Image: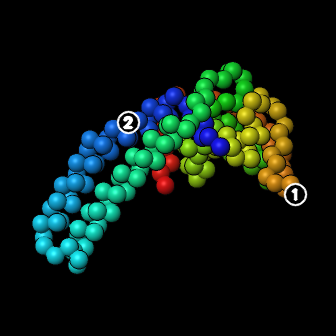
Amino acid sequence: MYDELTQKDIQKMQEEIEYRRLVVRKEALEAVKEARAHGDLSENFEYHAAKKDKNQNESRIRYLERMIKTARVVSDESKDDEVGLNNTVEVYFEDDDETEVFTIVTTIRGDSLNGLVSTESPIGKAVFGHKVGDRVKVQVNEDCSYYIVIRSIGKQVDDDAIRIRKF
């Protein structure tokens, strides 16, 4: 399965790659060189830690490049009255008699603890494309489902709110 990314997601990932190549890589190589100068490498913790940091940076660069290469680019445009990517949605949970607000995002940006719900999550799939006032069934699995009502839809305008989940 390919991850769905918007053009903004890809741009942020490319910016991170460039930063890691030009700044972090240089710092990591300098740290390795400095730690190597301390002598015996077999018991040199600084050297092993510096190598680990350097390798993690290179791994992150490869991961981001692979994500961009295999991504399916999707549009974040949606109708004003329908739930789409980067829309903030207020929903009413009938069973709990509670209201929640979250933003619909691509899979790579999903972070439910910070109110970013992926389009691949059960609730993201359920509300995507629906309108204010729609009563929607959220199917968690074969045995579990619940109903929500979409109360409002808003556009997210803060581009700096784009965060790429790090592994």
Which x, y percent locates residue 144?
A: 84, 56
**Could you tell me if residue 95 is visible in this image?**
no
For image coordinates 23% across by 69% down, the residue present is 46
Q: Is the residue marked by circle 2 packed among few (<14), some (14-19), or many (20+) residues within 10 Å? A: few
Q: How is this picture coloured?
A: rainbow
Tell which of 79 and 25 is nearer to you: 25
Mark 2 or 1, nearer chain start: 2
**Which image quarter: residue 13?**
top left
Q: Are marks 2 and 1 in contact (CB under 8 Å)?
A: no
Residue 22 location in percent, x, y? 26, 41
Residue 127 location (% of width, % of height): 75, 37
Nearer to the camera, 116 or 151: 116
Q: CA distance from mark 2 to mark 1?
A: 43 Å
Residue 148 horizontal side relative to residue 51, left or right: right
The residue that mark 1 highlights is 143
Looking at the picture, which amino acid does disc 2 mark?
Glu
Residue 20 vertical placement versus 76 (above, below): below
The secondary structure type at the circle numbered 2 is helix
**Residue 71 appears in which quarter of the rendering?**
top right
Q: Secondary structure at mark 1?
A: loop
Residue found at x 45% / y 41%: 65
Circle 2 sits on which residue?
Answer: 15
Q: Nearer the viewer, mark 2 or mark 1?
A: 2
Q: From the viewer's perspective, is 62 left or right of 143?
A: left
Compared across the picture, whether 64 is left or right of 57 comes to right
Where's residue 9, x and y in %?
50, 35
Q: Amino acid at mark 1?
A: Asp
* Residue beneath the point at 62% across and 23% down: 77
Mark 1, Cα crowd under 10 Å, few <14 / some 14-19 / many 20+, is few
